[in-house]
Image: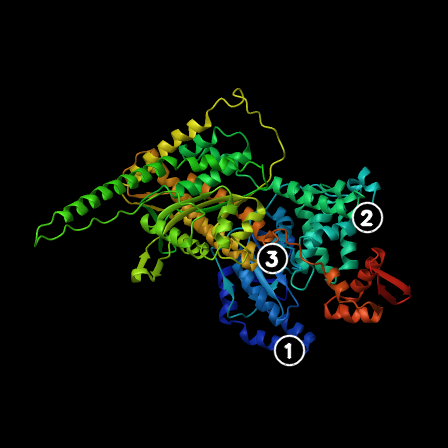
Amino acid sequence: MTAAVSVFRDFVYKVSDKPLVEVLNNIKTGTYKTEINKIRHLMSEGKEEEAETLKKQLLGFTASGLFDNYRSSENLEVYTQFIILDIDKLSESELNRIIPVINLAPYTYACFISTRGKGVKFIVRVNSSVEQHKLVYNQVVDYYEQALNTVVDTSGSDYARLCFMSYDENCYINTEATIFEIQEEEKQTITESDANTDNHQQLSTVEILNKCEAFTNQKGEYHEGNRNNYIYLFSANACRFGVVEEDAYQYCIANFDLSEREIKTTVRSAYKSNNADFAKFAKFANDTVSEEVQNQDNQNLESLSLLTTTPTIPKDVYNLLPIIFQKGLEVLKTQREKDVFLTGALSILSGCLPNVLGLYGGKEVYPNLFSFLLAPAASGKGALTYAKMLADKYHQAVIQNSKDEEADYKKELEAQKQAKKYLKKGEEAPEEPTQPPFKVVYIPANTSNAKMIKHIEDNEGFGIICETEADTLGQTFKNDWGSYSDLLRKAYHHEKISISRKTNNEYFEIDNPRLSVVLSGTPNQILNIIQSAEDGLFSRFMFYVFASNPEWLDPSPKSNPVNLTEHFKYLSDEVYRMVRYLDNTVTNIHLSDTQWEKFNPLFDEYLFRIYNLVSKDATSVVKRLGLMVFRFCMIFTAIRKYECQLKDTDLECTDQDFKNALNLADVYLQHSILVFKNLPNNTTNMQFKPTSPKANFLKELPQEFSRKQALTIGDKLKIKERTVDNYLAKLEQAGYLLKPKAGYYQKNKH
């Protein structure tokens, strides 16, 4: 059914119903160009009343409904399931920033500059009923406000709202936009009584909020360009600390220089999103302990409340994986062990699928994955050892074959030498045999750059690097002769590796390098391998980050009836049989058209969310995650080919395997973003904590100064007057400043 709207004149009198696309094309092609240009010209001259008079003479349309004769709720005939949003009073630079981002959103059906040229209108298709209009409207508003870091005008929440015609030659139209689905789950409302727990008797609300601000400063900094994000994070923490929304809002008004409207919207959004976690950290928030212990509590919050609660892989995924994975998982006990095994096994088995390829972005790609498991010591990373065992038989067989070929070569060489001794005059010496390459499957991580290249060359481009102590690779990368980060980056995308050596004037190329990499270690060990979030190697890895609560595991035979060593030896034999089966023919793997239709909108949304809610620098994670998903599909499909003994050389991923791949992607994306946020830009400390604006302000203050001087310094740092006064009061209260007389301060030397 073609989407339609009702067109009106003089606000209420219906002219006709028209297809929405026709109305949008009229806006795009300039049907109303003459009238609109007059209005915008009057606006540029400051004649707003005259502009408003002309605007009211324009036709308008109702995006959310079709009406009978008059525009009123009583005359609604059809609810069209469209929402129209409005952001007004924007400068030209703000329009140029916001419009491309709106157009990037997968839900945006249309977007155009408003009648007066000072705002933007955009339309979103929803799946709600007319009774749910206000609810879905608010959800769409929340989505775009978070993504755009700006406030949407909510005066247009009425489904009978009229939108005047406009002119925008760059009007964006996407009739295939994803439908925004209403979230109907009920959320409890936080009230003052909810917050009045016994714990709150220890500290006042202001003291709790001061502590909340200090905690937030360890995670982010309040500065130009990050103000909305900071207030959102602060408000989310305040919610978890058990502070009611109104108190958090008033604190933000008093302490931060964002507009009251933006603060209200951001605080509201944070409380709505974190409702379920209200008062989760109330005990921590109220503990009146020394600063040293508080810092330790902060660390505990990070390690226990964060790392122990990182997302786990859904159990539904386990039950529908290829059998080789299921057999490995069924003997492991804990959720984290299973996740570690599966993450490692995906990368290990990606290096055990010869002749398997597919087309992604028009380029031939192979299944090879890079994975990195990060956890504190004794957290359960040991399950990676079992994943590594899967390719042991394959590795042993390749090495044995290399040894046999080496032995044959030595025999032939010795025979050639003996033959040369007994040559008669005029006889030609027999040709010296060629030394065969020594192939392996597992390439040691503590290998020099030159030796790594030699291994890959001998292996004809393939190999697996599996290191259960990431520090081994980190130490290698520290040496001038050892770092092969550039090689890994190229190998991930199968880019040709060209090598030139002085010795014997050698030059050779490795086409289509196919490396799989699995690393595990503690969080700080990553820094010797990937030193910052800007390192291109970062986005090539899928991360799994966690911590386990201390728990004694019964090692007795009764509790462990399965001999894990023998179990995984058996699975290793199975993997080797699979390698030989797949080695016989090339296997091309692809997705169905329907799967691509699901794939692209999902990654559009991932890209949009990460760009706006995390950082534009993190978008590379999403782009490479798409390739990872395709490789998951290749791995699952190739393994099923072996399990079902299929002879086909062209296979389509099943819908179930595709769904599993997407579910895994969602989990690994969350872990990667966690690592991204904690990796430094340029430091050697994994737990990077940015300097707070208050600390910067204190640093800039002279030994003795007046309030007027402090305001001047605050202005240079883009800190508002009331915030400067608040900082001075807090610094005095904390003992950093002395106040010998009114309006004058001294730094306290302690």
Mark 1 is on which residue type?
Answer: Ser
Density class for disc 3 (Cα within 10 Å; few <14, some 14-19, many ≥20) is: few
| Front disc: 3 or 2 | 3
Q: Which residue is mark 2?
A: 205
Lower position in the chain sequence, tag 3 or tag 2: 2
Lower position in the chain sequence, tag 3 or tag 1: 1
Q: Nearer the viewer, residue 402 or 545?
A: 402
**How far across and how far down the image is residue 310, in percent?**
59, 42
**How far across and how far down the image is residue 434, in percent?**
23, 49
Viewport quadrant of the C terminus: bottom right
**How far across and how far down the image is residue 380, in percent?**
55, 36
Q: Which residue does the image show at 72% across and 68% down from the upper left?
A: 717
Mark 3 is on which residue type?
Answer: Thr
- Give SS at disc 1: helix
Q: Which mark is residue 683?
A: 3
Q: How many marks?
A: 3
Density class for disc 1 (Cα within 10 Å; few <14, some 14-19, many ≥20) is: few
Q: In 3D space, how far apart are the residues under numbered discs 2 and 1 (Cα atoms)?
A: 48 Å
Q: Which residue is mark 1?
A: 44
Q: Is residue 522 visible?
A: yes
Q: Is residue 692 above or below residue 301?
A: below
- Give SS at disc 3: loop
Lower position in the chain sequence, tag 2 or tag 1: 1
